[in-house]
């Protein structure tokens, strides 16, 4: 009986120079994070037989290697066998950042929740933990998505911070099933900070 050889995961297409991810296509762009960030690695894989997905992850941590911030840079596009699929972020706010249109969403929550198996977040978290870092109990993040190729491809960058310096926990910022009023001010500052700390250049 013949057995099929295991399929090797494709190699990441983008390269990293210091704290800059260099993408030659889809899109042609450099994504830079602060010099203090440490690169923990990259992965590229077939995401649920739906999309070609490539991630690059950077962290900033304290002396105890507890993450203070992390930067998740992702390039994703639908596979050819799904010709009619398109990304839709109509529910997110649209914001112009450094000359580019991004769909923006900010969130917060505990870090102990188990991610969906083989999801992009599971891969990101594993890269961080396997590099010897620990996540704080609560974090907040901003997701920035730039669409291209008729909305069949995307550049997604997620900037995440320890929630503790705000003086709040996830429970403090939740009012039943919706964010509490205090989240509005925290969210605004977080989005502005993400816009400054991540640089997009051609």
Image: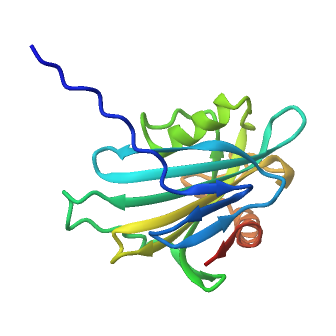
State how many labels appear. Answer: 0
Q: In this view, which residue lies farthest toward the left?
A: 1
Give percent across and percent down for residue 44. 45, 46
Whether residue 143 appears in this view of the structure is no
Q: Residue at x 39, y 67 (%)?
A: 153
Q: Residue at x 9, y 13 (%)?
A: 1
Q: Residue at x 19, y 57 (%)?
A: 81
Give percent across and percent down for residue 171. 69, 45
Give percent across and percent down for residue 181. 70, 65
113 vs 99: above or below: above
Which quadrant: the C terminus? bottom right
Give percent across and percent down for residue 185. 76, 69
Q: Is residue 1 left or right of residue 125?
A: left
Q: Is residue 72 left or right of residue 146?
A: right
Q: Residue at x 59, y 50 (%)?
A: 56
Location of residue 23 by image quarter: bottom right
């Amino acid at each position: 009986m013949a057995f099929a050889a295991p399929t090797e995961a494709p190699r990441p297409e983008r390269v990293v120079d210091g704290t800059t991810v260099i993408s030659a296509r889809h899109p042609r762009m450099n994504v830079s994070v602060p010099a203090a960030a440490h690169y923990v690695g990259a992965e590229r894989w077939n995401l649920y037989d739906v999309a070609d997905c490539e991630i690059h992850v950077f962290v900033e941590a304290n002396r105890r290697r507890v993450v203070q911030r992390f930067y998740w840079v992702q390039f994703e596009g639908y596979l050819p066998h799904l010709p009619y699929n398109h990304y839709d972020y109509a529910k997110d706010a649209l914001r112009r950042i450094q000359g580019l249109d991004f769909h923006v969403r900010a969130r917060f929550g505990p870090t102990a929740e188990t991610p969906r198996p083989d999801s992009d977040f599971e891969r990101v978290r594993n890269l961080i933990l396997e590099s010897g870092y620990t996540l704080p109990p609560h974090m907040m993040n901003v997701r920035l998505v730039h669409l291209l190729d008729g909305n069949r491809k995307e550049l997604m960058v997620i900037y995440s911070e320890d929630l503790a310096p705000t003086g709040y926990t996830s429970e403090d910022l939740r009012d039943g099933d919706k964010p509490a009023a205090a989240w509005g001010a925290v969210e605004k500052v977080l989005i502005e900070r993400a816009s400054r700390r991540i640089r997009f250049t051609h």
